[in-house]
Image (cartoon, coloured by chain):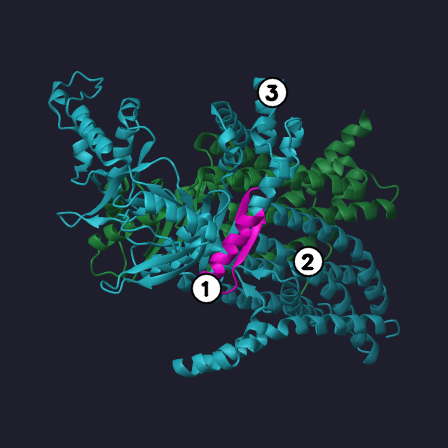
Amino acid sequence: MQGNGFKIGSIVAFLAITLWYLLPTIQYSLEQNYMDDLSPSETVQYKEENKQKLENLRSKILSLGLDLQGGMHVTLEVGFPRLVKELAGDNADQLLDDVIDTAHEKSLQNNTDFITEMVAEFESRDPDARLSRYYRNDAMDITRRSSNDEIGTFLKKQRQSALDRAIEIIRTRVDRYGVTEPSIVKQGSNRIVVELPGVEDKERVRNLLKGTARLEFRLAADAQEFRAFVNQLYDYYASYEQPSDSSDSTTANQLNPLQEVLVPAQSPYLVGYATKEDTAKVMALIKTEEVQRMMPRSTTVMWSANPMPGQGGEDLYQLIGVRTQIELTGDVIEAASVQFDPTTNIPEVSMSMNSDGARKWGRITGANIGKPVAIVLDGFVFSYPNVQTKIANGRSSITGLDGVEEADDLVNILLSGALPAPLNILEERTVGATLGAESIQAGLNSILVGLGIVAIFMIVYYKVGGAIADLALLLNIIFILGILAAFKATLTLPGIAGIVLTIGMAVDANVLIFDRIREEQRTGKTLKAAIEAGYGNAMSAIVDSNVTTFFVAIILFSFGVGPIKGFAVTLMAGIVASLFSAIVITRILVDYLTHNKQKSVSFG
Amino acid sequence: MRWFETPNFNFTEARKFSYILSGTLFIISLIAIFTQGLEYGIDFKGGKEFVLAFEQPVNVVELRDNLSEPLGSTPELKLYGTDHEVLIRTENEEAMASVQQIILSTVQKVYPNNPVRVDKTDVVGPRFADDLKMGALQSVIYAIVIIFIFILIRFRNWTFSAGAVAALIHDVVIVLGIFTILGDHVPFSLQIDQTIIAAFLTIVGYSLNDTVVVFDRIRENSNVHKGMDFVPMVNKSLNDTLSRTVITSLTTLFVVIVLFIFGGEVLKGFSFALLLGIVFGTYSSLFIASALVEELEVRTKKS
């Protein structure tokens, strides 16, 4: 047994560390079992009393992936082209817009960096032109003389900070919404991966994540001018003949195409009403060049955010005429809260502005008494109340909300700040809690049955040697879980599959060793010599084969996402643990059995 | 118990058959892949997918017929594990909330007395799907390149690298071919998605494991039996390690079968890929990888 002291020490140490990391997980599940037996009110009370302890435990447990506990996984992309356009501010022109759009297309096609493409595209149009004319910024040391490369670096820096800011804002929003253990991480140069365990209302979360919270106050269109435009518009489409490529003569007698999708309105500020399905068709009819020419100067149309009931009870959205000029933006909002209208008890969001905002707001309201001001959020009009009096205290409120949840979320979004650039959902996956629970059960069953079959087979085939390998296998699974907990890895369903697979493959090292021992015995060696030679000679095969599998696991880890990463992690943990248990633990046991009892150990 | 105690199979002789078998399977697989095309899952194709759990059994054809009109195109529908769970995939491009609303209101109209729950939803944008596809392709290519280099470093002989990598490609192509051919003929999904790619890389790792153990023995034997010819030495090495190869394959096969039966619907395709991978991986380690090394060795020595 001499020389084994170190090995025994390392086993004890490894086991102790593993159990140390697994302890919170065990404690936490005990706590949960305890709470399951309590009545709901007792549970609430218990949770309240032990809040600190439970939170502390939860932060250390081996966490389950969304596929096992249910929840929502969203990959968002930050819309940088828009950010870069906006950074240019008033300097932006058609050329820059073109360059940005082309560069965006190219970067998607060739999988290259958007800003590098943008600089290249700009230079390819005019090698002597300077991007600095769009991005002069004294604070950032960007002068007219700055080279295009410097501008590129500047834009990349802006992009980086916009991404970081977006992550911060999303984190704030998610925290306010109240999700336990959310995970929000950056992926690459323009993506954010958000994982939200246990969320139920998917649509609410989507809006919460995407909402840029661009709050704008705009004046409504000039009533007379706009009324004239609307009349002209309906007349235009009444006499409009559809450009038909068929010889179908009935098309000439068709209904007014606009009235098919839009119900005319009485209010001078409205073009009409449409159902949600028809809004796109209406916009197609209004965005035509001819109609745009009829539109009064500095005027545009926007949809209402929430519907109102039509005559048949259908949900109708209003198309409202507003000015293109933005009088005031959400930057001036200092505080926001949900209030209830004292008479109707309908929820609304009440906001107060900083002093600068309050001054401007006072001027705007003072100059437009009796006229409507549209409150626009992310391109949709929430309300367009008539200004009653000059508002000097910087207060304002958003009405026309769908319900108290929308009011809550709106306050959340307003207070978390506006996103620097719009976010698009690239990928979204949700798993219900029931399916998650079923998956856990399926995974556990697989582990137990797999373990049982392999264990029995090893004992039948290798006798005592097999029993030793089985013991190592058992420790091996504990080690894997410990390693996962220590590295704060998440256990996913593919991860559990990885553990099951490891059970089958972990015995490989022992199979290699035991087969080698049998082989050495056949050459006439004594048991002890055969064991010595068996372990020694099998080593290079064990190391080589495990290192190659480890490489594959690393590749899986670096390319896979979500659950696949979990699989790769368990595979890696499995390789490390099985090498240790097969080489060190079984060796100790084999040595112990052959040394102390002077008895032969059968390898079958 | 001892199997293959002192086996003395003539693997070199058996090669003629294995070449014919592998060649046939390989070509059939390639033809299947190129004519039918790989059937991609949502990860690589994009779209929207829903898993609905009903309380009572439902009729897939009836649901599909009823959903086609409101969704604007015929959705893909199949049972998901049991006869009261269905997977619906649609290309409908409207917002997620409205698509889910359309589906739920339609199925409730078709089955008014059969409560339904949404178990799982996936939305993958077309661009994201392309990215995932590219990532998967890259990971497989990188895996092969790294394996080639690692074996080259460890065994200091490019023929070993070439033999191992050829065997891996053989395994992956045949499993892909079987996936393509079986496609719609099995009661579970064999669409190629991220999990299947993970399974393929595991197959690569596993098959390599077997191959490396044999190579290791060839290296050892070439040091011990210096005068022996290369061909009989490879044969001896294969026989020496045969018992281990079979036992490890068996234990791994056991757990993968367990996973296939007990692992639930999500892991069906994954464990099926592993199952095939272990069978072909073991076969290729015994009959293809070393055989190719031999061919290459003999040829390069001659020239």
Q: In this view of the protein, can residue A125 be seen by the observer?
A: yes
Provide the residue designation for mark 1: A178
Label annotation for residue A575 = 2
Residue A480 in picture, x, y percent from top left = 64, 64
Q: Nearer the viewer, residue B209 or A146?
A: A146
Residue A113 in picture, x, y percent from top left = 59, 33
Q: Residue at x 46, y 64 (%)?
A: A178
> What amino acid is found at the position of numbered circle 3 in the picture?
Ala
**Front of the two marks 2 and 1:** 1
Snapshot quadrant of residue B13: top right
Secondary structure of the residue carrying numbered label 2: helix
Give the letter of the cyan chain.
A
Q: Nearer the viewer, residue B297 or B39?
A: B39
Residue A437 in picture, x, y percent from top left = 44, 65
Q: Residue at x 63, y 43 (%)?
A: B284
Magenta segment, which residues? A164-192
**Front of the two marks 2 and 3:** 3
Crowding at mark 3 (Cα within 10 Å: few <14, some 14-19, many 20+): few
